[in-house]
Amino acid sequence: MDLLLYLIILMFSAMFWYRKKYGQRNELLEKFQAPEKSMPILRHSFMLINKTPSQILNVFSELAEKCGPVWRFDFSPFTSMITVHDPKILEQILSSQKLIDKSDGYDNISNWLGNGLLMSTGAKWHQRRKIITPTFHFKILEEFVEIMNKHGNVFVKKLKKYNGRPIDVFPLVSLYALDVICESAMGYQLNAQIDDTSEYVKAVKEMASIAFLKSFNVIKRIKFLYQFSNTCKREKVVVEKLHDFTNSVISARRKYLKQREFMADNEKNKDDNDEIGMKKKTAFLAFCYKFKLMDNH
């Protein structure tokens, strides 16, 4: 009898705690349309069980057609996601200087990307944003058009090999973007489009796959359980490879910039061509070095 009474009190206490903590949130979420099928604990996430990444995308594509431009997806009684497909609403959200707090989904790549501009919020985000804003001036970006064109030519040559056949263009575009980012931001020519079997390219692909699965797997979303999984062990290996690569690039660029006194002589050495890129090109990594951000990396 005492045990039954204890369980009843515990149950009502849990219900009271949940309503107090999540009641207002749930009332707001109810205003959004959601899939009709739902389960008590798993809610809508039961639709994702044992699904591959491509199958998960198909599920969300079908739900988007049924639910409209803005709808809700509940992973559990504690976690929900609002999906937006309306460009006008997205523009307001993405251009906001106040709506910068990241969702829990970003935790899936925090081990890889750390707590920099993409992941941070508040004062730290504003500080980092203020520092890098000059690098996104259109005149500076124009300097890297030649880099984009160079890798774009490689991209076009790869497309021509398919002779107009239908293909999945996403992997090809990803490799092109990786080449452009590595050379313009870090001053490193990765040549991912030419050699997509390099360790770094494979690590990026695997990390992206791991992050995607963590986002939609109910068990992997629970940090306590995830740390015992094989996926977690594999993630640690992949993240180590990614960090080793970026650290080696940062170390090499720091050494190079010190030796050449890059910052002091940048304007004087107008005819200097090196692996950073084209004439007068200052890779983003060099810009960060100037502001001593790498010491806090």
Image (cartoon, helix red, strand yellow):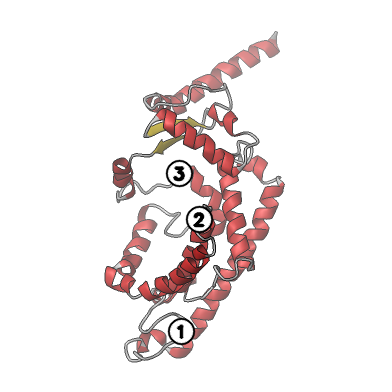
Q: Give the vertical position of 243 relative to 273 (above or below).
A: above
The residue under the point 59% across, 57% down is 205
Q: Nearer the viewer, mark 2 or mark 1?
A: 2
Label 1 sits on a secondary structure element that is helix
The residue under the point 54% across, 57% down is 171
Residue 38 image offset from top left, x and y in percent = 54, 23
Q: What type is the residue that disc 1 sits on?
A: Leu
Residue that label 1 marks: 257
Comes first in the chain, label 2 or label 3 = 3
Density class for disc 3 (Cα within 10 Å; few <14, some 14-19, many ≥20) is few
Comes first in the chain, label 3 or label 1 = 3
Residue 34: which quarter of the image? top left
Residue that label 2 marks: 169
> In the visual, does 204 lie left or right of 187?
right
Determine which of the numbered discs, if any, sits on residue 103 in the image: 3
Residue 177 image offset from top left, x and y in percent = 47, 63
